[in-house]
Image (cartoon, rainbow, N blue to C red):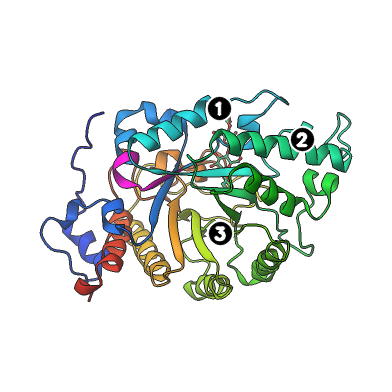
Amino acid sequence: MRRLPRLFTASPVFMALVVGGGSSLHAGESTQTLRDAAGERLLVGTAIMSHHLDDPPHAALIAEQFHCITAGNEMKPDALQRVQGQFTFDAADKIVAFAEAHGQTVIGHTLLWHHQAPRWMFEDEQGQPLPREQALENLRTHIHTVVGHFKGRVKGWDVVNEAIDDSEPYLRDTPALRAIGYDYVIKAFQFAHEADPDAELYYNDYNIERDYKRDKALRMIRELREAGVRLDAIGVQGHWLLGSPSLDEIDRGISAFLKQGISVMVTEMDVDPLPRNDAGADLSATERAGQNPYLDTFPDEMHHRLATRYDELFRLLLREPGVTRITLWGTTDAHSWLNNWPVRGRTNHALLFDRDFKPKPAFHAARNALHDANSPATSP
Ligand code: G3I
């Protein structure tokens, strides 16, 4: 694989903007990768699709910049067992082999989610819930087979994704809940632990750090612990906007989880600079139309705002030793899910690398924050 061209070309103006004049960059550091800047402080990751690995500059960037890889889609239930009993591991295996070849860790995403889940798992052909025992057996077989297949090669699993409701109820009304009942989350964790007792297990969701959803996430932690299941970390997805949520709100949420003695991982970070609703990653909150203001260029002023937000967010997260991973939900702007949500077909700029694989000022902001956190002796 060819090495990355040296692309670290942010202008002096942006360097000044993103380091705020107070940082301690010295000669040579400007080529440091995210992975090197973070060192042992925490894992820095990205979400990918297996076909990204066929594109040499993209593959090189993934290999060079990150400690760990999450499969953005290809370990989800509908990717691995779309037809009952027929498991298709090729794409996921390719991701795991790539990670291993580059000394990277793999995060499994996800064993159970109401999106990208095959209908047969919890519903009959009329759309009615399966009997509990049958649904449990389907879930058990899926999790045992998948976690068993990757045993020893996947460090940790997002066992259940987005089970918490955004409004009144505690849990979201899903096919799994209707067929199995309220203990379906606990059962999924139990099955995962049976299949690989050494794998870390996470509960993953969007907006759980926010005031309106935090108590339910604390309840989830409490109930999983009361059930005696393994729970290593709470996954805060981190689909954030330029102006929301506030740093204070994020801080309140993360501190509340850390106070429970549990690690926090930011599992799907991006910062959306386009105008839109504030729905986290609620896929039902689709908008039929929306402005697409940065189709041709992303202005300097917006680069500055994005970099400033990444700088603030990374520095906030890095203050807490209990935050043990930050994974970006994609590597370049070309491959961000935000090009198609909540409005289809927009041109988004939410990540650290642009469409030419070049690091943006936001990259330098994140990288410098990592560097400073990892080198306290040289921090201002
Ligand atoms: O694979 C098909 C392809 O065959 C077809 O031609 C194409 C046409 O649209 O669609 C492809 O499937 C798309 C799939 O991503 C793979 O690219 C789906 O339409 C699209 O809906 C799907 O979106 C994914 C989304 O989850 C919804 O399932 C995003 O890529 C993925 O990044 C996103 O990830 C989620 C996390 O898993 C959980 N948290 C929120 C996050 C963002 O929604």
For marks 3 and 1, the one nearer the N-term is 1
Dot 2 amino acid type:
Met
The magenta stretch spans residue 336: no
Residue at the spot of label 2: 121
Disc 2/disc 3 C-alpha distance (Å):
26 Å
The quadrant holding residue 183 is bottom right
Q: Which residues are magenta?
A: 62-69
As drawn, the residue found furthest toward the left would be 27
Circle 2 Cα neighbour tier, 10 Å, few/some/many (<14 / 14–19 / ≥20): many
Locate residue 190 relative to residue 233 in the image: left or right: right
For marks 1 and 2, the one nearer the N-term is 1
For marks 2 and 3, the one nearer the N-term is 2
On the image, the x and y values in percent for residue 317 come to 42, 67
Residue at the spot of label 3: 232
| Observer-nearest of 298 and 246 | 246
Dot 1 amino acid type:
Phe
The quadrant holding residue 109 is top right
Of tags 3 and 1, the one toward the viewer is: 3
On the image, the x and y values in percent for residue 126 come to 89, 31
